[in-house]
Every structure is written in C-alpha cells, then in structure tokens.
Amino acid sequence: MDGSQVFILGLGFQFPWKLVSQHLDTSTKPSVLTLNVAADRGSLLPLSLLWQSLSCT
C-alpha cells in the first residue's frame, strides 16, 4: 500500500474523488501537509456537496 492509498482510506475519499498529489513541508513549524483532491471532468457529484462548495465561496 502506497502513501496515497493510506490518505484515501484515512480520509474516507469515495468515488469520484481522488488524491492527485501530496506534499509535506517540514521546513515550517508546525509542518504543513498539502493534499490536492480532484474529480474527473464530467463526474456527477451529490447536490449537497455542490451546495456546500458554492456556500464556501
């Protein structure tokens, strides 16, 4: 099992979400973990998730 799979399982990602990249910056205190998450173009998302993403902007 690679690092990406560990994050996917730990965070509970489900289709259509996928972990695109990850970066741990240990040069800062506290350390910063950056995760890039995406879905394929044209993927159908539940309306509740779409509403939440629009409400945050």
Image (cartoon, rainbow, N blue to C red):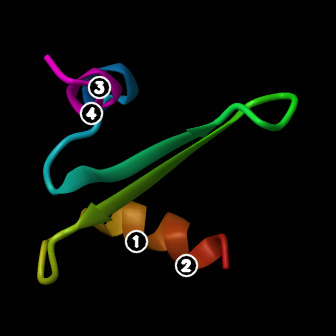
Q: Secondary structure at mark 3?
A: helix
Q: Is residue 12 magenta?
A: no
- Asked whether the beta carbons under mark 4 and mark 3 sit within 8 Å of each other, the answer is yes
Q: Earlier in the sequence, mark 2 or mark 4?
A: 4
Identify the residue under disc 3.
3
Q: Nearer the viewer, mark 2 or mark 4?
A: 4
Nearer the observer, 48 or 25: 25
N-terminal-most mark, 1 or 4 = 4
Q: Secondary structure at mark 1?
A: helix
Magenta residue check for 6: yes
Measured Cα–Cα span from mark 2 to mark 1: 6 Å
**CA distance for labels 4 and 3:** 4 Å
Closer to the eye: label 1 or 4: 4
Range of residues picked out in magenta = 1-7
Vertical side of 45 occupied by 35: above or below: above
Above or below for 41 versus 11: below
The answer to whether residue 19 is above or below residue 47 is above
How far apart marks 2 and 4 lie (CA) works out to 27 Å
- From the viewer's perspective, tell me whether residue 21 is left or right of residue 9: right
Residue found at the far front of this picture: 27
Q: Which residue is mark 1?
A: 50
- Circle nearer the N terminus (1, 3): 3
Callout 1, which amino acid? Leu
Q: Which residue is mark 4?
A: 4
Residues under numbered marks 2 and 1 in contact, where contact means CB atoms less than 8 Å apart = yes
Label 2 is placed on what type of residue?
Leu
Q: Residue at position x 36%, y 52% from top?
A: 21
Tell me the chief SS of the magenta region. helix
Between disc 3 and disc 2, whose residue precedes? 3
**Which of the numbered marks, if any, corresponds to residue 54?**
2
